[in-house]
Image (cartoon, helix red, strand yellow):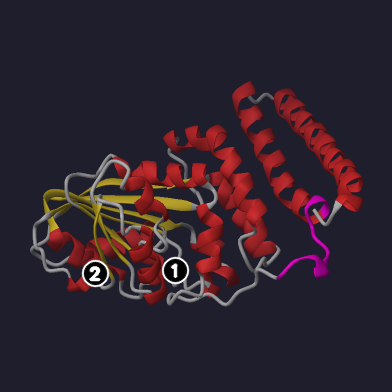
């Protein structure tokens, strides 16, 4: 909000958008029921349209700020710490981060390692109940991690280069969250990680999905790729001969996020993750997390889990 002088106009705009969203949902629901769809599928589709409309409408008509009322969030991102603003924005979405972390927790053991820990968002959640070593190549992130976790007894080590680790066959789980897409030779990281894992250990990676969603923002923050089923085959073909794996998960998730990303980053060419977008997604998680149990053909992200055998 720009100030109290804009409070009532914004309040009116908010209710106008909300009214039209509800009306559109009722119309879509009624049309689908009339055509012959069931109430569950009709509800799901109509809610999806409302979420999509809200993503665009609230951003463009309600929460759009005047150009001179804020400092631009259009930073130049890189692997060497220029994306700190994005990491800090996402960290505020606690429900979202715990949702992402929940996809990793079941695979953790007594000795764990995180690749590309960033500013420590996921590590802070993991370390509530599990010991973990954290690594990040960025000098700035490394400094942040050292300072943030200096009193955390469950953070067993803070390092930078995963390839400096030579503790073969020692780890129960090695994981990453939105990291592998930054790495040109991601299969080298996979092979090295598998050597570090115990037999029966897990390599877990949450990655951005669908090449069709690749945007100028992806490029700006150092994403080399967005993942698909093709990358699963690429990983399999690049495995070193003495390494054997079993796939446990290779699933898309967060279809609502995919729709929002397509509209915001692809169609509207948005240059940064805005705080209100992160908070909207954060508030939606309790209502859309159940979609993870469906075998969806698309999503904003993928969860890739392999077991060393």
- Against 86, is 56 above or below? above
User: Where does the magenta region start and end?
Assistant: 61-71
The residue labelled by disc 2 is 162
In the image: residue 72, left or right of residue 8: left
Which mark identifies residue 225?
1
Q: Nearer the viewer, residue 4 or 244?
A: 4
- Against 218, is 256 above or below? above
From the top left corner, tell me how far across and down residue 125 is, in percent: 37, 46
Residue at position x 33%, y 57% from top? 149
Q: How far apart are marks 1 and 2 (CA)?
A: 20 Å
Residue at the front extreme, as displayed: 151
- The tag earlier along the polypeptide, 1 or 2, is 2
Residue at position x 35%, y 75% from top? 184
From the top left corner, tell me how far across and down residue 291 is, in percent: 49, 35
Q: Which of 2 and 105 is in front in this view?
A: 2
SS at circle 2? helix
In the image: residue 294, left or right of residue 136: right
From the top left corner, tell me how far across and down residue 263 is, in percent: 67, 57
- Of marks 1 and 2, the one in the foreground: 2
């Amino acid at each position: 909000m720009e100030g109290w002088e804009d409070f009532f106009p914004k309040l009116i705009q908010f209710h106008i958008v909300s009214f039209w969203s509800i009306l559109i949902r009722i119309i879509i629901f009624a049309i689908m029921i009339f055509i012959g769809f069931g109430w569950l599928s009709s509800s799901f589709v109509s809610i999806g349209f409302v979420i999509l409309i809200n993503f665009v409408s609230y951003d463009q008509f309600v929460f759009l700020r005047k150009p001179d009322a804020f400092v631009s969030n259009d930073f130049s991102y890189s692997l060497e710490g220029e994306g700190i603003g994005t990491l800090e924005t996402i960290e505020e979405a606690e429900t979202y981060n715990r949702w992402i972390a929940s996809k990793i927790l079941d695979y953790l053991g007594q000795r764990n390692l995180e690749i590309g820990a960033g500013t420590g968002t996921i590590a802070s959640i993991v370390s509530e109940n599990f010991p973990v070593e954290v690594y990040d190549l960025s000098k700035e992130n490394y400094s942040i991690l050292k300072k943030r976790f200096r009193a955390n007894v469950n953070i067993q080590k803070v390092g930078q280069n995963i390839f400096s680790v030579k503790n073969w066959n020692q780890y129960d789980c090695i994981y990453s969250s939105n990291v592998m897409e930054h790495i040109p030779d991601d299969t080298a990281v996979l092979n090295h990680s598998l050597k570090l894992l115990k037999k029966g250990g897990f390599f877990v990676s949450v990655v951005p999905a669908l090449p069709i969603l690749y945007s100028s923002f992806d490029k700006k923050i150092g994403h080399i790729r967005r993942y698909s089923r093709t990358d699963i085959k690429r990983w399999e073909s690049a495995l070193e001969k003495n390494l054997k794996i079993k796939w446990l998960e290779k699933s898309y998730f967060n279809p609502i996020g995919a729709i929002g990303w397509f509209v915001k980053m692809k169609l509207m060419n948005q240059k940064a993750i805005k705080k209100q977008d992160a908070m909207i997604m954060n508030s939606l998680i309790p209502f859309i997390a159940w979609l993870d149990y469906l075998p969806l053909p698309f999503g904003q992200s993928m969860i890739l889990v392999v077991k060393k055998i």
